[in-house]
Amino acid sequence: MHISIDTSDFAVTGKEKLHLKKRKTKIKDYYKTKSDYRELLEEFQDEINGLQRMMYAHDRYSMLLIFQAMDAAGKDGTIRAIMSGVNAHGISVQAFKQPSATELDHDFLWRTVLRLPQRGRIGIFNRSYYEEVLVVRVHPDIVHDSQKLPTHLTGDLDNLWKQRYESIRDFEKHLQRNGTVVVKFFLHLGRDEQRQRFLDRLDEPDKNWKFSEGDVAERQHWDEYQHAYEDAINATATKDAPWYVIPADDKKNMRLIVAQIVLRHLKALDMQYPQVSESRREELQRYRKRLLDD
C-alpha cells in the first residue's frame, strides 16, 4: 500500500502571504480505517529509516525538523509516531521550555545552536527559537523583566520582532549553506478541538497528568497567538527553509502528511552509500575467507 500526498498544498515558501483563517484545521482523511492508517505510517517509517541510514553513511547532510503549535496540537505524538522506526543513533529530539538563567545570559539563538544535529543525523526541535517571536511577543513583559537586553533595543518592540525575524532568516540560511536542511511545521489546531482535548485531559484519568492550568490561561490569548504565528511564518518562510501548515484536528491524518513531507525532503538529497574501492573490496574478501576458514 502506498499513498502520495501533494505536500505543496501545505507549503508556505514566502511566495504568497499566509492567512491562517483561510487554512483549514481539518481536511479529508488520507486513510480509510485505523489499520489502514497503521499500515501507511509503517511504510513511511521504513522509508524514512532507510534514507536516514544512507544520510548517516553519506555523512554530508543533516536535517532539522522544527515543530511549533498551540498547546494540545499533538507535537509529541507526531514526533514519536514518525520517528519510532528510525535508528536512535540517527536522530535527536530537543524540547525547549522556559530559558534557564544561563541561557538568558546569551542571545536568543544560543541555546538552540548548542543542540543542532550533527552531520548524518535528523535533529528535531519540539518548540524552538521561534518561541522568541511567539510567546515573548504575546507576553512582551518577558523582554523587559528577564531578557536583559539594552534599553535602546527594547524601546520599539515592533522593530525588535523584525530584527529577530531577520536573525532567524540569516541563521537558517547559514544552516542551509552548511548542509543542514531546515523544515518547519506549524500544526494548525482549531480552537474548538483544543477545548475538547483539554476536556479529555480532565475527564480521562490516564490523561490527567497532561493537564496544566497554564494551558487554559494561554488559551485566553488565542487570537494574539494566531496573529503572532501568522506574522512569524510570513516573515521567515523561504524556498530553502519552508514552513508547512498542517491541519491538526485529526492526529492520524496530520502524522501521515508530516511523514510524507519529511520523506520528500530526504529523497531530494543527493546521497549515496560510500563507494568501496576495488583494492578494499579484495581486502574484504580476504577477511571473509579467514572467517569462513576459522
Image (cartoon, rainbow, N blue to C red):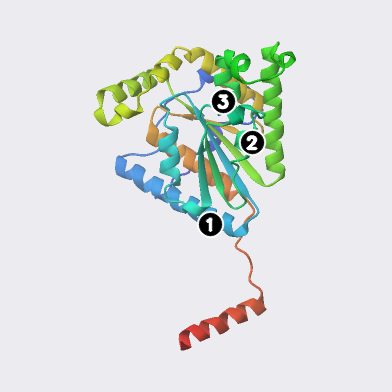
Q: Mark number for residue 53?
A: 1
Q: Mark number for residue 241?
A: 2
Q: Nearer the viewer, residue 17 or 230?
A: 230
**Camera-nearest label, 1 or 3:** 3
Sequence-first disc among 1 and 3: 1
**Secondary structure beneath label 1:** helix
Q: Mark number for residue 97?
A: none
**Secondary structure beneath label 3:** helix
Sequence-first disc among 3 and 2: 3
Q: Say if mark 1 contacts mark 3, CB within 8 Å.
A: no
| Image position, residue 287 (x, y; %) | 55, 82
| Picture quadrant where residue 161 is located | top right
Residue at the (56%, 32%) spot, across then down: 128
Instruction: Answer few, some or many: residues within 10 Å of disc 1's Cα (few below 14, many 20 plus, some between 14 and 19).
Output: some
| Image position, residue 122 (x, y; %) | 55, 47
Q: State the separation of the CA atoms marked 1 and 3.
A: 31 Å
| Image position, residue 232 (x, y; %) | 61, 23
Q: Nearer the viewer, residue 269 or 279?
A: 279
**Type of the residue with mark 2:** Ala
| Image position, residue 32 (x, y; %) | 33, 39
**Secondary structure beneath label 2:** loop
Q: State the separation of the CA atoms marked 3 and 2.
A: 17 Å
Residue under circle 3?
A: 131
Instruction: Answer few, some or many: residues within 10 Å of disc 2's Cα (few below 14, many 20 plus, some between 14 and 19).
Output: many
Sequence-first disc among 1 and 2: 1
User: On the picture, is 89 further left or further right than 133?
Assistant: left
**Visible residue check, residue 19:** no
Relative vertical location of residue 255 with respect to residue 282 in this rendering, above or below: above
Q: State the separation of the CA atoms marked 1 and 2.
A: 23 Å
